[in-house]
Amino acid sequence: LMELETNPGIFSDLEDSPNHKDFDFPSSALFSYRPVDNFFFKFGVRYNQIYEDAPWLPYLGFSWEMFEGVRLDLLAPEYIELSWWPSAATAFSFGAEVQGAQYRVRASSQTGKQRANLQVQEVIAYLGMTHRMSDQLSIRARGGVVLAGDYDLTTGAENFDNAEGALSQSFYADVTFGFDW
């Protein structure tokens, strides 16, 4: 199985006319190989801004159905998840994930607003549920906590007062709709 995914978006505060650095295309290519009935080996490559110094990293992981309806998924360097599938259409999960991005923002300075980069990275732990309404439509909801993270606001300019620090623990939630074809 080969999966290609891209998530184009605007990663900016849009306070000024956008330029090429305001747009990003986090993407991945993932290959899955099934050597036995209950185990998939996964490898590939991904591009995103989670790790500031390494936007391109390899993927390496597996999906293992430990026994019927219980699966362990690992995809380094981004997530691990244990899921229970009481039916083919519904899953309940517990996992941890590293996520983040780099955003283009405008920072106030003595000479007016200047462009800056805001790098955010967070580690989340979550409980979730996935339900497939049909072969083409699904919904996923997750809730949990931000365990750790950091941010770094900089322009790279010599006199810019860099702002960086740790993120506070907080509540996390997301809802995702899936369309397959």
Image (tube, rainbow, N blue to C red):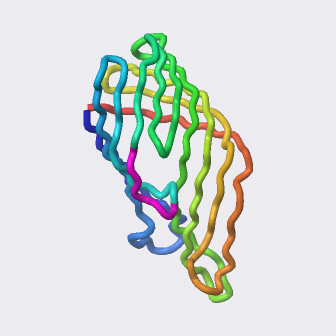
Nearest the viewer among 6 and 136 is 6
Residue at screen point 54% across, 70% down: 15
Looking at the image, residue 116 lies above or below residue 84: below
Q: Is residue 112 above or below residue 23?
A: below
Q: Is residue 95 left or right of residue 59?
A: right
Is residue 38 something that shows in the picture?
A: yes
| Magenta-highlighted residues | 52-59
| Residue displayed at 65% across by 86% down | 159
Q: Residue furthest bottom?
A: 111
Residue 50 place in picture, x, y as percent: 51, 54
The count of marks equals: 0
| Residue name at image x 48 percent, y 16 percent | 70
Residue located 45% across and 74% down the image: 17
Q: In the rendered image, is residue 26 in sight? A: no
- Residue 53: say if magenta: yes
x and y percentages locating residue 74 in the rendered image:
47, 34
For the C terminus, the quadrant is: top left
Residue 137 in which image quadrant: top left
Q: Quadrant of the N terminus?
A: top left
Q: Nearer the viewer, residue 176 or 45?
A: 45
In the rendered image, the vertical position of residue 158 relative to residue 148, given as above or below:
below
Towards the viewer: 85 or 74: 74
- Asked which quadrant contains residue 143, the reply is top right
Q: Measuring from the top left, give residue 34's x and y in whole percent.
A: 29, 26
Q: Position of residue 22 (x, y in %)?
A: 45, 67
In the displayed orientation, state which residue is furthest to the front. Answer: 35
- Taking depth in this image into account, of 71 and 154 the one nearest to the observer is 71
Q: Is residue 47 above or below residue 69?
A: below
Magenta span contains residue 79: no
